[in-house]
Image (tube, grey):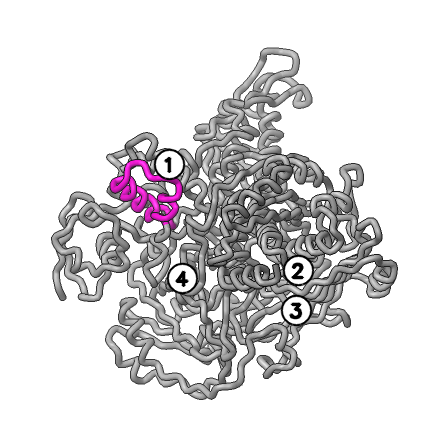
Amino acid sequence: MPDGSVGQAVKRREDQRFLTGKGRYVDDLHRQGELAAVFVRSTHAHATVRNVDKSAAMQSPGVVAIFVGSDMEEDSIGSLPCGWTVTDRHGEPHKSPPHFPLIRDKVRYVGDHVAVVLAETLEQARDAAELVEVDYEELPANVSPAAAMGAPLLHEEAPDNLCYDWVLGEEEAINEAFSKAHHVTKVDLVNNRLIPNAMEPRAAIAEYDSGTEDYTLWSTSQNPHVLRLILSAFVTGIPETKLRIIAPDVGGGFGSKIYCYAEETVCLWACKRVGRPVRWTGDRSEAFLADAHGRDHVTHVELAMDEKGEFLGLKVDTTANMGAYLSNFASCVPTYLYATLLAGQYRTPVVYCNVKAVFTNTAPVDAYRGAGRPEATYVLERTIEVAARELGVDPAELRKRNFIQPDQFPYQTPVALTYDIGDYEASLNKAMSMIDHAGFAARKAEAKARGKLRGIGFSAYIEACGIAPSSVVGSLGAGVGLWESAQVRFNATGTVSVLTGSHAHGQGHETTFSQVVADTLGVPIENVEIVHGDTGQVPMGMGTYGSRSLAVGGSAIMRACGKVIDKGKKIAAHLLEASVEDIEFKDGNFTVAGTDKTKSMAEIAFTAYVPHNYPEDLEPGLDETAFYDPLNFTYPAGTHICEVEIDPETGVTEIVDWVAVDDFGKVINPMIVEGQVHGGIAQGMGQALLEHGVYDESGQLLTGSYMDYCMPRADDLPFFRVGLTETACTHNPLGVKGCGEAGAIAAPPAIINAVTDALGVLHMDMPATPEKVWRLAQQAAAAE
Amino acid sequence: MPTVTITVNGQQESREVEGRTLLVQFLREHLNLTGTHVGCDTSQCGACVVHLNGKSVKSCTLLAVQAEGGEVTTIEGLASGSQLHPMQEAFREHHGLQCGFCTPGMVMSAVDLLQKKANPSEQEIREWLEGNICRCTGYHNIVNAIQHAAQQGSGA
């Protein structure tokens, strides 16, 4: 190996272009003759659309076309599908009402898509969109998940606005567990609605070539191949061979760019209809209204414990808000990515979870960084904290008492997952040591002398990542396989092109994947080029979400590298006049075992393309493709501890210290991993202290801009202290688990546990805004 | 339509624009300088920060005509040839960027901070960045990068 770069903090190869303004995002691109698209969006949360009068708008300068839902219907454009069918407690499939890119009869949330205006310039399209007159007949709206089942009906197909009523676990078993309880802790909590807010707004450019009948769609997608599959198979009928999707540099995703959205679908359809390229770039207001939101659960939880504080059973009752329509993967988030994580790091023998997913007049809700696992972790870690306080037990001690022990792996949880490996106490102990847990009482006293309330909060999380074994998700209702593919292609001059189905939108794959390939093949890292984000170049892929890129995409790359090495051995054996079995590959050289006869990887690659002296039965070329379907999920886990100080006079919560100790298995690039942890914590902190997507009763989004939706700013956050423990994943070739979502999963309960500790209350709902905190602080002061 | 003349990255540029054209549109659409980004519509995210006459401004909040006769520096004009500006170098060295979308605005803003104050405290850096939103990094490595640039005394 030239550098042995795996494990090193190699600086990112992608940074040069981003730092010099040479990143190429969708909105930076232009096509000859393009039209600008502007959407006419519903201003009502629930209404029948009686008429759309385009006449005035059509007269506006520069307008080329205005389309409504019936225009798409004429061309048989279908509904945006949900790709995961959840089977309810009665054995029935969930309700998945039609979700047309442009509405056909009713609008069901503010921001819903009524019409699209295409004009020569963006300004002209905007001006004309203002002139489209929509005749709405308003209907009563509902935004509350808790009230949804008694609310006015959104879809004929979904009685009681119920998408599904789903259960994991045995009711009899949980009742029996609770019958033995010495103490039952009960908590009612809300997991607040979040709006993802990747900094780059979504955008699309669609172009049709009437000569070849090829479509090209540039989209801000986390998974261009999945988008192609959905658009081709379910929505437009365009053959996959005729549809190329390019997701170039993409400015953050966090889940919100997984989905097939109305806007890009309309652009793709309209570009053929008008015979010109069509571009759309969302503005931030549109992102707030119409990007898929996250979380929005209402939950009642009960934890049964014996006299020693050992967990006997956990019972969880959740209502999950799906919004107005089922987004592509919405259904699996509060079920298979949520209830299956409710064992956490603990030996709880019985878990029972009931989830009712409901429709409301709000933006669709789908996976957002963590997706189900933050909600599960919040339920567990909040409840355990309350239990510790009720029992008068140290919260760390209560956790340790119930941790799955290192010698119990592989560990079959009562909620379907089999954890392969972990050491939870090691992470907790390291975190406690890093934060000087023993010194907390003194710090609290010192803070009190300054008039501040100091609190400490733990969060011991686990997540299921590397999504996911296809056979498992298939048996649970997924409509797709969740493998990843890679192509590793040596060029004759010894450089390596690596084509991956994973997609980077901030994660630094061009660096991490290059490190893996350089070390595995023994070539200089600068000779490796990572290609992603283009279905026209990368043969196949499933994309990036669920912390899967390295664990699944990286494993596919490893497998392709293995094939390259195997073929290289055959070429080397021929050149060195030895048998294949005697060829060893190490540090980029093929050597006849026990001799100094050797050929370098570069020589082998050259020979493969200039095969003058070559094995007769071997194809020329050194270009291998591999698919990798994971054998199990990976299970990153760890403990985060934070300390907060509250000013009781203002209610402002300051995070004064944060330690994160995570077990991600093997780490390829610690600099990138730490960066992922920082960003995840910031998003989790945003949920806990600042962010809340709020609709008023009529369904108007009150938090529709950065004026009202509070994003974490630099001065809301401290420096984070990141530590690692390591138990290598047992079932993928890299031993890696994934790190992208951990912070967002761990952070919210750590903060709320700290805030409630400081305030001396058992529970408060997120976000812990200064107003809420101030009221609780005043009540506490009055009670003293 | 009015004609505006602005010196951008040292080069004088004249274009006929609609009166309502924002400076950021002038840069992105008329000059194809797409390094300056638009991340919001309420002047808060700071992805569009450039320097106008040496000071950082949000180019989404100025009309192009307001910059008439002025000198604008964008992210594309910060490096000297292939030599990155010390602030760009610090962001690279300390992993101060992930998806890269907020990065041009962050860097331009940070350069102006060090022009105004050569050795800002951590808190001063964090407060200065109030007008620049990053969703990826948790700001940890951005603040770190700016601190290092300041320590080297060359980040402005």
Q: In this figure, which residue is indicated by the disc labeled 4? A: A706
Tell me, yes or no, whether the highlighted magenta stretch contains residue A756. no
Q: For mark 4, does the 10 Å Cα neighbourhood hold few (<14), some (14 to 19), or many (20 or more) residues? A: some
Query: Is there CB contact under 8 Å for labels 2 and 4?
Result: no
In this view, the mark in front (3 or 2):
3
Say which chain tag 1 marks: B
Q: Position of residue A189 (x, y in %)?
A: 64, 64
Say which chain tag 3 marks: A
Q: In this figure, which residue is indicated by the disc labeled 2? A: A478
In this view, the mark in front (2 or 1):
1
Q: In this figure, which residue is indicated by the disc labeled 1? A: B147
Real-space Cα distance between discs 2 and 4? 35 Å
Instruction: Name above or below for residue A94 compared with residue B134.
Output: below
Real-space Cα distance between discs 4 and 3? 28 Å
Chain-order first, disc 2 or disc 4: 2
Identify the main secondary structure in magenta.
helix
> Given the image, on which type of amino acid does mark 4 rest?
Tyr
In this view, the mark in front (1 or 4):
1
Real-space Cα distance between discs 2 and 1? 47 Å
Mark sitting on residue A319 = 3
> Given the image, on which type of amino acid does mark 2 rest?
Ala
Real-space Cα distance between discs 1 and 3? 46 Å
In the rendered structure, which segment of residues is drawn in magenta? Answer: B102-129
In this view, the mark in front (1 or 3):
1
Real-space Cα distance between discs 3 and 2? 21 Å
Chain-order first, disc 3 or disc 2: 3
Q: Are marks 2 and 4 on the same chain?
A: yes
Instruction: Name above or below for residue A614 compared with residue A261.
Output: above
Q: Position of residue A113 (x, y in %)?
A: 45, 74
